[in-house]
């Protein structure tokens, strides 16, 4: 038999604390059952759950731990744990674990209060909280920047759809993003990220930009908006818009490409993904000329997009080959996943429009980026308030990890 003791050590952080305490435990032949440590603003909190042989005098062990902590100016609390209480804790390890990620331009106390209250109301226990965004200077604390806190939670919401609805309502109410995903092997082993192009990697719809050059901007923009909202079939709306470009001088394609703006965080995201060994791809219902242009700038590995048909230097109002619509996007994602020797659970798909939903749905992590309400509500995850590089937070990377500090 063994006696179980929980030790909590706290005070100003300094070297040698953990070594001193575990040294005492070693001298009493204690077994460490669990250990955790956190430091916030140079204040340490160390927890050790230990099993001590029954013949050991617990009071003697406690006294020696207190003695070793005195020169380090640390304090400690001690609590005996009943066998039944410990066994109940052990049985918790089989329960599902999830990651809740809170992203905002600035995280306020009422954001945390509301989110944790929802988690508690659905019987989810928070095991760990980690700040992924970098530290900020005091004079910057009132400014809008980028902030992220990650929660590790244990348990399963009894009403998952109601829980998701509650998170969406919080996100809308406070203009924040909240992601909820299973903490499993695939979260740490995703290897391919697939992006839509228009209004995702770039802050524009290329076909609208071309329409302006052709003098039919208002007509095409209205059709584009209806298609993105899911009010029109993508393929039909695409053909209608494309036909309005008939006769456009193909020489304007380069000038349009050069004035396109990357979405916030796109460059940092792609560069970081490449460093981390991810493969990246563009699968777009837009045009290959612009996908190839972005590939040269960003170093994207694959590009799949519609090829504009051009005759005698002018756009014909058609494309070559099959139109890439929503279903075709999903098919291409499957094919690329197989080509890379991956499983769909290892793929991340990012898009903003209704035609992106099929690929967002089959990917292991589907992210609606600054998306229309229909898409945001239907996708597994959504980022609306930060840039594209907020995706790195969903993968568990901190600013320190990615060099964003």
Image: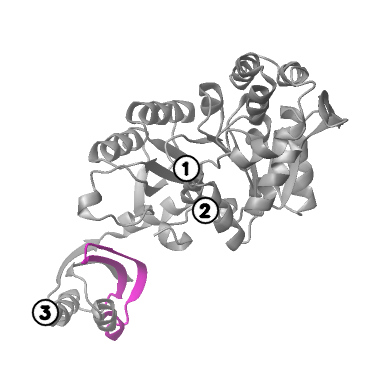
In space, the residues marked 3 and 2 are separated at their CA atoms by 47 Å
Residue 373 visible, this orientation: yes
Circles 1 and 2, Cβ within 8 Å, touching? The answer is: yes
Q: Residue sitting at 66 percent across and 38 percent down?
A: 255
Task: Between residue 114 and residue 304, name the one nearer to us.
Answer: 304
Q: Secondary structure at mark 1?
A: loop
Q: Which is nearer the N-term, disc 1 or disc 3?
A: 3
> Can you identify the residue that label 3 sits on?
70
Question: Magenta region's main secondary structure?
Answer: strand
Q: Quadrant of the C terminus?
A: bottom left
Taking the view exactly as shown, the residue that stands out farthest to the bottom is 27
Q: Which is nearer the N-term, disc 1 or disc 2?
A: 2
Q: Residue sitting at 74 percent across and 17 percent down?
A: 244
Q: Secondary structure at mark 2?
A: helix
User: Percent position (x, y) of residue 272?
Assistant: 55, 57
> Can you identify the residue that label 2 sits on?
268
> Can you identify the residue that label 1 sits on?
387
- Indicate whether residue 358 is drawn in magenta: no
Give the tally of numbered discs. Answer: 3
> Is residue 44 left or right of 398 when viewed as pictured?
left
In space, the residues marked 1 and 2 are separated at their CA atoms by 10 Å
| Magenta residues (range) | 25-54
Give neighbour class at mark 3: few <14, some 14-19, many 20+ (Cα, 10 Å). few
- Indicate whether residue 42 is drawn in magenta: yes
Q: Quadrant of residue 45?
A: bottom left
User: Percent position (x, y) of residue 291?
Assistant: 70, 42
Q: Which is nearer the N-term, disc 3 or disc 2?
A: 3
Q: Nearer the viewer, mark 1 or mark 3?
A: 1
């Amino acid at each position: 038999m063994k006696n179980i003791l929980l030790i909590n050590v706290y005070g100003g952080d300094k070297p040698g604390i953990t070594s001193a305490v575990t040294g005492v435990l070693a001298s009493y032949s204690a077994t460490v059952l669990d250990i955790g440590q956190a430091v916030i603003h140079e204040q340490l909190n160390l927890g050790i759950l230990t099993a001590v042989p029954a013949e050991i005098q617990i009071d003697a062990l406690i006294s020696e731990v207190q003695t070793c902590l005195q020169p380090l100016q640390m304090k400690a609390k001690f609590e005996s744990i009943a066998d039944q209480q410990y066994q109940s804790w052990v049985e918790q390890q089989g329960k599902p674990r999830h990651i809740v990620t809170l992203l905002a331009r600035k995280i306020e106390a009422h954001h945390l209060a509301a989110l944790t209250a929802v988690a508690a109301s659905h019987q989810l226990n928070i095991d760990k909280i980690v700040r992924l965004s970098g530290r900020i200077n005091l004079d910057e604390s009132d400014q809008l920047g980028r902030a992220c806190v990650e929660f590790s939670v244990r348990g399963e919401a009894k009403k998952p759809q109601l829980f998701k609805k509650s998170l969406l309502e919080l996100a809308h109410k406070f203009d924040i993003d909240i992601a909820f995903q299973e903490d499993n092997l695939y979260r740490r082993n995703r290897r391919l990220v697939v992006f839509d192009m228009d209004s995702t990697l770039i802050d524009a719809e290329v076909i609208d930009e071309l329409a302006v050059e052709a003098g039919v901007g208002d007509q095409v923009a209205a059709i584009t908006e209806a298609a993105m909202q899911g009010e029109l079939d993508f393929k039909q709306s695409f053909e209608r818009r494309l036909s309005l470009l008939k006769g456009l001088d193909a020489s304007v394609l380069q000038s349009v490409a050069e004035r396109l703006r990357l979405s916030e965080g796109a460059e940092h995201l792609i560069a970081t993904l490449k460093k981390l060994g991810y493969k990246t791809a563009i699968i777009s219902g837009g045009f290959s000329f612009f996908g190839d242009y972005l590939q040269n700038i960003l170093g994207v590995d694959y590009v799949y997009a519609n090829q504009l048909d051009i005759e005698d230097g002018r756009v014909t109002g058609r494309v070559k080959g099959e139109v890439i619509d929503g279903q075709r996007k999903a098919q291409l994602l499957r094919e690329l996943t197989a080509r890379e020797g991956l499983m769909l659970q290892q793929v991340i798909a990012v898009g903003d429009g209704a035609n992106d939903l099929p690929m967002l749905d089959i990917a292991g992590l589907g992210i609606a980026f600054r998306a229309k309400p229909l898409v945001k509500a239907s996708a597994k995850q959504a980022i609306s308030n930060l840039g594209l590089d907020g995706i790195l937070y969903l993968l568990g990377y901190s600013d320190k990890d990615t060099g964003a500090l």
